Image (spheres, helix red, strand yellow):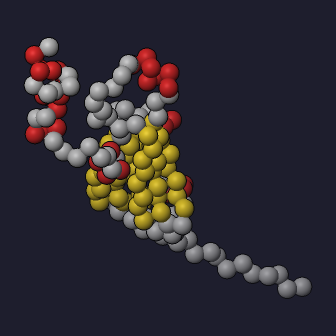
């Protein structure tokens, strides 16, 4: 092969030397879980891109005021063998997560979530109005 004589390992090496592919090979959660946050009607609307994940791969957890979104996608050894030897990988596999502080007054029931076409949408209230309890009187006999 002509390219092998120029010191290239394969036909694809030349393509990946292009400046378009010159970005860092490391993947961070923010690169994988790109997120937009909007404010509308007294709520925050969080839209997170999770292409390639299914609904069952995604988990949303609320603990001590932090909303954590985790996405998990690992190839099995059988899937890797079926695809063959990987010479260049840009699609992320593994586990990634993002954490947002939403306040300690929120409960899981306050947050609405939907996943469609690779986009996770969450509606998070900006403020939770505390319901004041009616005073309970003790019957005096």
Pick out the residue farthest to the top. Answer: 1
Pick out the residue farthest to the right. Answer: 141
Pick out the residue farthest to the bottom. Answer: 140
Tell me if I can see residue 43 in this picture.
yes
Q: Determine the residue positioned at 45% across, 44% down.
A: 95
Q: Is residue 61 left or right of residue 42?
A: right
Corner quadrant of residue 138 = bottom right
The percent position of residue 87, horizontal first and vertical second, equals: 29, 27
Q: Determine the residue positioned at 42% across, 58% down.
A: 99
Q: Nearer the viewer, residue 116 or 72?
A: 72
* Above or below, 137 relative to 26: below
Q: Nearer the viewer, residue 63 or 2?
A: 2
The percent position of residue 43, horizontal first and vertical second, equals: 36, 59
The percent position of residue 48, horizontal first and vertical second, equals: 34, 46
In the rendered image, the quadrant that contains the N terminus is top left
Numbered marks: total = 0
In the rendered image, the quadrant that contains the C terminus is bottom right
Tell me if I can see residue 113 in this picture.
no
Q: Nearer the viewer, residue 4 or 41?
A: 4
The percent position of residue 117, horizontal first and vertical second, equals: 34, 32
* Above or below, 74 relative to 80: below
* Above or below, 6 relative to 130: above
Q: Nearer the viewer, residue 90 or 1?
A: 1
Q: Is residue 47 left or right of residue 11?
A: right
């Amino acid at each position: 092969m002509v390219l092998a004589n120029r010191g290239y390992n394969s036909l694809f090496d030349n393509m990946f030397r292009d400046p378009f592919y010159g970005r860092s090979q490391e993947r961070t959660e923010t690169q994988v879980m790109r997120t937009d946050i909007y404010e509308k009607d007294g709520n925050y609307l969080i839209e997170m891109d999770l292409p390639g994940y299914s609904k069952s791969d995604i988990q949303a957890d609320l603990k001590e005021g932090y909303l954590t979104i985790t996405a998990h996608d690992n190839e099995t050894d059988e899937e890797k063998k079926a695809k063959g030897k990987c010479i260049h990988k840009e699609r992320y596999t593994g586990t990634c997560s993002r954490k947002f502080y939403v306040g300690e007054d929120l409960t899981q029931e306050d947050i609405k979530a939907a996943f469609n076409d690779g986009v996770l949408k969450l509606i998070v209230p900006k403020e939770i109005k505390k319901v004041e309890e009616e005073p309970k009187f003790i019957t005096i006999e």
